Image (spheres, helix red, strand yellow):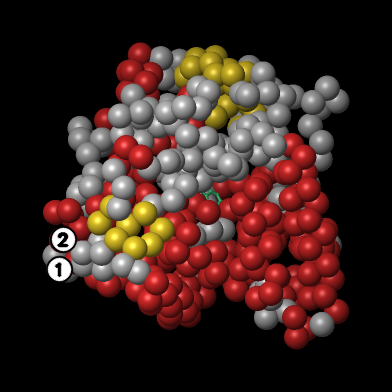
């Protein structure tokens, strides 16, 4: 279940989008950037945090691993209050919560998996999967739900194949991941989903250790290259962290990006006739939509001043990436969606040592999916009034519940 903007209880500021146009950040952010760039917010657990809204401040916070750690273990989008005995140790393998040196150690092991060579080899597969999904849409059309029929299955399939998860297990695993990626508090369901995910991935890692035949995917390759340096717990944690980060964000960007282009038919036409550059368009979509509303919950490791605000050691800090990416320091018309512009230096993937591991994979999927969709369906149009669409601000990745289209 996801939260609907109009009739839900107030959506927390740090995930809020505009009620006039949910493709934009909430209107409050423009005022906050101008007048009160670092503001107190209350997390749904009752804990308070500082929300950073300007580009330069947010860039500094997300990039500074030493002063702003990611050690607060956050199981859902709504961060927990500070536990009485201090933070628990990071869950093995959840490297984004590791201290800088350990984090760097795991990033070194993983970087090649998402580097240019592997992605070049992956491109034909992304094309085949996207084409298969569009052929299925055509067969059952002339209408489809662009989320359930395209934006979700393409990146999910690519990512589960990449991890090496056998076909019969994929759907169940993905459903558990979807429960964990919805921040609406449902503790029991989420605990069950996490336990199932953990049990499955632990058994999967054991199988990959025992049987090299099971090691075709990323987990198997990690065992071949670094098996002696990684415990099974750590490998299962890495797989879980990757699964939770590896497709929903791309789903949101493909779905909302398609919607954005339906609302800017001139720009969609320029992509169709080849007069607009696909790479630029994708970069602008990433910036404009910023589907990750706040990257992480950081903990200040020392007293520090950000945007004129004193932040005390131990306090939580969140950065609004959609707000930062619309800051006028990027350009006077940063609020405008314009696929022809020279790409602006956005924070949609974060910045620095914790920069998104899968940024190039996401770009590849978007560069394949968006123009193909437009070209394969020249008459693509929204099948319900825009006002009836339901968005998902409470999900780890902003998206739509569904996107009914016809052609
Ligand atoms: C449009 C798609 C995506 C967006 C917008 C996105 C966004 C982000 C952002 C903002 C962060 C940084 C969080 C922070 O430090 O505050 C991040 C980190 C991360 N992303 Fe992505 N991401 C996308 C796709 C992917 C994909 C396809 C993967 C697959 C591997 C992935 C894996 C990760 C991982 C593992 C991290 C943690 C990096 C670390 O802490 O070292 N992401 N992503």
Residue drawn 85% across and 79% down? 210
Q: Quadrant of residue 141?
A: bottom left
Describe the element under mark 2 as helix, strand or loop.
helix
**225 or 168, which is in the foreground?**
168
Left or right placement of residue 256 versus residue 116 in this view: left
Distance, label 1 to label 2, CA atoms, is 6 Å
**174 or 291, which is in the foreground?**
174
Left or right placement of residue 165 versus residue 356 in this view: right
**373 or 120, which is in the foreground?**
373
Q: Is residue 145 above or below residue 26?
A: below
Residue behind mark 1: 273
Find residue 277 and report its horizontal and vertical position in percent. Answer: 22, 63
Q: Quadrant of residue 240?
A: bottom right
Find residue 278 and report its horizontal and vertical position in percent. Answer: 26, 63
Residue behind mark 2: 269
Find residue 301 and report its horizontal and vertical position in percent. Answer: 67, 27
Residue drawn 74% across and 24% down? 82
Of the 4 image quadrants, the one containing the C terminus is bottom left
Q: Is residue 361 above or below residue 88?
A: below
Residue sticking out furthest to the bottom: 213
Describe the element under mark 1 as helix, strand or loop.
loop
Query: Is residue 336 visible in the rendered structure shown here?
Result: yes
Residue drawn 53% across and 58% down? 247
Asked if disc 1 and disc 2 are in contact, CB closer than 8 Å, the reply is yes
* Some atom of ligand 1 lies within 8 Å of the CB belonging to the residue at label 1: no
Left or right placement of residue 56 versus residue 161 in this view: left
Which mark is on residue 188? none
Which class describes the residues within 10 Å of circle 2: few (<14), some (14-19), or many (20+)? Answer: some
Count of marks placed on residues: 2
Query: Is residue 286 visible in the rendered structure shown here?
Result: no
Of the 4 image quadrants, the one containing the N terminus is top right
């Amino acid at each position: 279940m996801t939260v609907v903007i109009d009739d839900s209880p107030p959506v927390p500021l740090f995930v809020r989008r505009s009620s006039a146009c949910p493709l934009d950040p909430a209107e409050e952010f423009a005022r906050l950037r101008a007048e009160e760039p670092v503001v107190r917010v209350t997390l749904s657990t009752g804990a308070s945090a500082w929300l950073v809204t300007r580009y330069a401040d947010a860039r500094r916070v997300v990039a500074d691993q030493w002063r702003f750690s990611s050690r607060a273990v956050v199981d859902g989008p709504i961060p927990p209050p500070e536990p009485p005995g201090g933070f628990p140790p990071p869950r093995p393998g959840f490297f984004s919560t590791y201290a800088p040196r350990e984090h760097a150690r795991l990033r070194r092991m993983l970087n090649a998996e998402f580097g240019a060579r592997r992605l070049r080899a992956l491109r034909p597969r992304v094309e085949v999967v996207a084409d298969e999904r569009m052929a299925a849409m055509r067969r059952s059309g002339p209408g489809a739900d662009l989320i359930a029929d395209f934006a979700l299955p393409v990146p999910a399939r690519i990512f589960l194949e990449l991890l090496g998860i056998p076909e019969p297990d994929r759907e169940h695993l993905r459903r558990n991941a979807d429960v964990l990626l919805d921040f609406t508090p449902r503790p029991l369901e989420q605990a069950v989903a996490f336990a199932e995910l953990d049990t499955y991935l632990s058994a999967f890692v054991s199988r990959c250790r025992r049987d090299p035949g099971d090691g075709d995917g990323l987990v198997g390759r990690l065992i071949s290259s670094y098996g002696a340096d990684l415990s099974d717990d750590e490998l299962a944690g890495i797989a879980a962290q990757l699964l939770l980060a590896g497709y929903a964000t791309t789903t949101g960007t493909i779905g909302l990006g398609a919607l954005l282009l339906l609302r800017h038919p001139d720009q969609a036409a320029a992509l169709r006739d080849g007069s607009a550059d696909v790479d630029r368009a994708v970069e602008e979509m990433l910036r404009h939509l910023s589907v990750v509303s706040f990257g992480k919950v950081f903990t200040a490791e020392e007293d520090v001043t950000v945007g004129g605000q004193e932040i005390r050691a131990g306090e939580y800090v969140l950065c609004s990436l959609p707000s930062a990416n619309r800051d006028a320091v990027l350009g006077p018309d940063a609020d405008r969606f314009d696929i022809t512009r020279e790409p602006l230096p956005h924070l949609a993937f974060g910045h620095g040592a914790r920069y998104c591991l899968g940024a190039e994979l996401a770009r590849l999927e978007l560069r394949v999916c968006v123009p193909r969709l437009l070209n394969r369906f020249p008459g693509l149009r929204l099948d319900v009034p825009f006002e009836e669409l339901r968005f998902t601000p409470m999900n780890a990745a902003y998206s739509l519940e569904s996107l009914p289209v016809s052609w």
